[in-house]
Structures are given as C-alpha cells and as structure tokens.
Image (cartoon, rainbow, N blue to C red):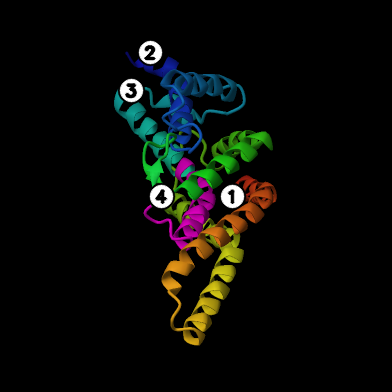
Amino acid sequence: MDQWIALFLPFGLLLARITAFFATLPIFSHRTLPMRVRVATAIVLTVFFAKVVPIAPVALRDAHWLAATVLMVREVLAGLALGLAVALIFMAVSQGGIMLGRQMGMAMASILDPTTGERSQPVSILFQMTFMLLFLVSGGHHVLLRVIKESYEIFPIGTTPEIGSMVTGVVTAGSAMLSYALRLVAPMIGAFMLLSVALGIAARAMPELHILMISFPLRIGLGFFIAAMIMPALGSFTNELADWMAKFLAS
C-alpha cells in the first residue's frame, strides 16, 4: 500500500492544491460550469504543472497513509487560502455595483444570479459579468496560472505553509477589495452627495414639493448615467486588478 501511495502522492498533492484553488475562484466555481469541465480542467493543469513544479524530498519520503493525509490537508488549505484571496479581489467590482444599486434605491430589487445561485442586485450582476468578460479577454487566466505557479515557489510541496502568512494574505486581499471598490464608485458617491444637497435645498425652498417622490426617478436616472460612465473604465480597472494579483505573492 505504501508503494502505491508513494507512486501517486506527488500527483495527488499537486491536484489537491490546484483543485482547491480553482474551486474557490468566481469564474470556475460557478454553477453554470459543468462539474466535468471543472474536474477535467484541474486534472489537465495538474499534468502540466507536474512537469515544472519540484516535489520536496520529504513529500516522497513520508509515504505511509497518515503522513500522506497530512500533506494533502496542507495542500488543500494552501489552495483554499490562495483562491479565497483572489476571490476577494474579484468581489471588488460586485461590491461597487451593490453600492451603486443601493444609492439608486434598488436595494430591494434583487434577482437570481445564475452564476452563483444566490440573489443579487441587477447592477452588481451587470458589473460582475462585464468584469469577468474583460478579465478573460485581456488574458487574466494567465495571471491565475502565474499565481498558482508562484505559490509553489513560496510554499513548496512537502513543506508546512505558515498559517500567519496565509491569514495575512487573505486580510490584505480583503482590504484591497474594499479599496478598489471605493475607488470604482467614488464618482457615484460624490454625485449622489451633490444630488442629496440639491434636493435638501429644494425641499427648504419649496416645501410644497414632494421631494421623496421626486428623488426616486432622479436617483435612478443619475445611477444609470454614472453606470454608463463607469462601464468604459472597467477595462483599465481590470488591468489594475490583474496587476495586483500578479504582484500579490511577491509582496
């Protein structure tokens, strides 16, 4: 039994981290992507990485089932932490869309997101789908492959990944997500603040006006106008996020 474990252990360790990494990514974890495609993608990438990723001697020396199980758990944890950090960066655009939808007064106008199976706001879904298309068209999948390859240089197979480093990476990705989301919707926040000031002045100058009813169409119209202005800028915003992910492990 130990001989069979020693034979398949290197491939299994590679497969564990790659599968855990892609299982948490927004693109490859969507329900619309068939499970066969996900499994086939993980296996094909594992075959390619097996040619370039060195295996630490300790991983081959610990060939009994208990040590192999511990090594597999380590690889799964490393892949999940890395995938979660990248997934948080992907959430920057969707969070920006949620902020815009709330300012437009469409917080309750939620629809079913076919990619995740959860309810979300239409503006957020529009931003997220546009960002994913631009990310793939601009070669973002190459960035993901580069991230998983560099992870093997920082956390080689057979070594124990530092829990503190993984937690720090996830926290850093979360703070970067909030920063990029605020940068994306900064024009919207300023525009709606000006609109609120103008409505407040109008309410004081003309008390007979029903400001609440007037503000609804104004907020929706302003929100669509700002969304139309933000959409062309998503291309450069996508490149910024891709550059951040490419430098994530190096930092």
The first of marks 1 and 2 along the sequence is: 2
Q: Say which residue appears at 55% left-offset and 78% top-offset.
A: 198
User: Hey, what amino acid is under mark 1?
Assistant: Phe
x and y, in percent, of residue 145 in the image: 60, 33
Is residue 131 or residue 190 the one in the foreground? 190
User: Hey, what amino acid is under mark 4?
Assistant: Ile
- Between tags 1 and 2, which lies in front? 1
Q: Say which residue appears at 49% left-offset and 20% top-offset.
A: 43
The first of marks 1 and 4 along the sequence is: 4
- Between tags 2 and 4, which lies in front? 4
- Between tags 1 and 4, which lies in front? 1
- For residue 135, above or below residue 68: below
Give residue 31's quadrant in the image: top left
Which residue is under mark 2?
A: 4
Q: How would you rate the neighbour count of disc 3 (Cα within 10 Å): few for under 14, some for 14-19, many for 20 or more? A: some
Q: Are marks 3 and 2 in contact (CB under 8 Å)?
A: no
Q: Give the label on residue 64, or none.
A: 3
The first of marks 3 and 2 along the sequence is: 2
Give residue 226's quadrant in the image: bottom right
Image check: 158 left or right of 243? left
The first of marks 3 and 4 along the sequence is: 3
Q: Give the label on residue 248, or none.
A: 1
User: Hey, what amino acid is under mark 2?
Assistant: Trp
Q: Say which residue appears at 51% left-offset and 41% top-offset.
A: 155
The first of marks 2 and 4 along the sequence is: 2
